[in-house]
Image (cartoon, helix red, strand yellow):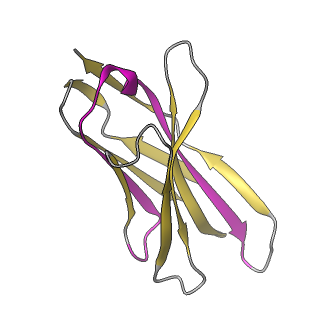
Amino acid sequence: VQLQASGGGLVQAGGSLSLHCAASGSGFIIDDMSWYRLPPGGSRELLASREMVATFTRYGIANYGNSVAGRFTISRDPGKNTVHLQMTSLNSEDTGVYYCQAVGRRYGRSYEHTFWGQGTEVTVSS
């Protein structure tokens, strides 16, 4: 499974930006998809995740980190292995490299594999 993230860039403080990530490949059922952030000189932080329930048509509740709750929204496209992150009210602390992550299982198997995208950079200027 390969993850391709896009949508990063430079934005002014208070502005908005949307990130997108698509998983490609075969042989896996993608369950949870998440967004992480690696700030300059900091450690990787889980921002948001959204699970897929077993019906393959609905997505479970979203979970958010404290630093982005109320400002960021994670969404997934029904029937597609894509995830989006809509970011609003951005501030300088949101600067960093954003990574999408997917957790998947081979058909008929329960072992979960974790996949990472290449990262997309977000810079918030004050």
Q: Is 121 placed left or right of 51 in the picture? A: left
How far across and down, in percent of the image, does residue 108 sit? 77, 80
How far across and down, in percent of the image, does residue 121 sit? 39, 27
Vertically, is 102 above or below 104? above
Task: Residue 59: tell me if it is visible.
Answer: yes
The residue closer to the viewer here, 78 or 1, is 78
- Look at 27% across and 32% down and name the residue there: 90
Q: Quadrant of residue 79?
A: bottom left
Q: Is 111 placed left or right of 121 in the picture? A: right
- Look at 34% across and 47% down and name the residue there: 72
Task: Residue 25: tell me if it is visible.
Answer: no
- Look at 47% across and 65% down and name the residue there: 81
- Look at 37% across and 69% down and name the residue there: 77
The residue closer to the viewer here, 8 or 91, is 91
Please check the rendered image and state whether residue 105 is part of the magenta-colored stretch, yes or no.
yes
Please check the rendered image and state whether residue 21 is part of the magenta-colored stretch, yes or no.
no
Q: Which residues are magenta?
A: 78-107
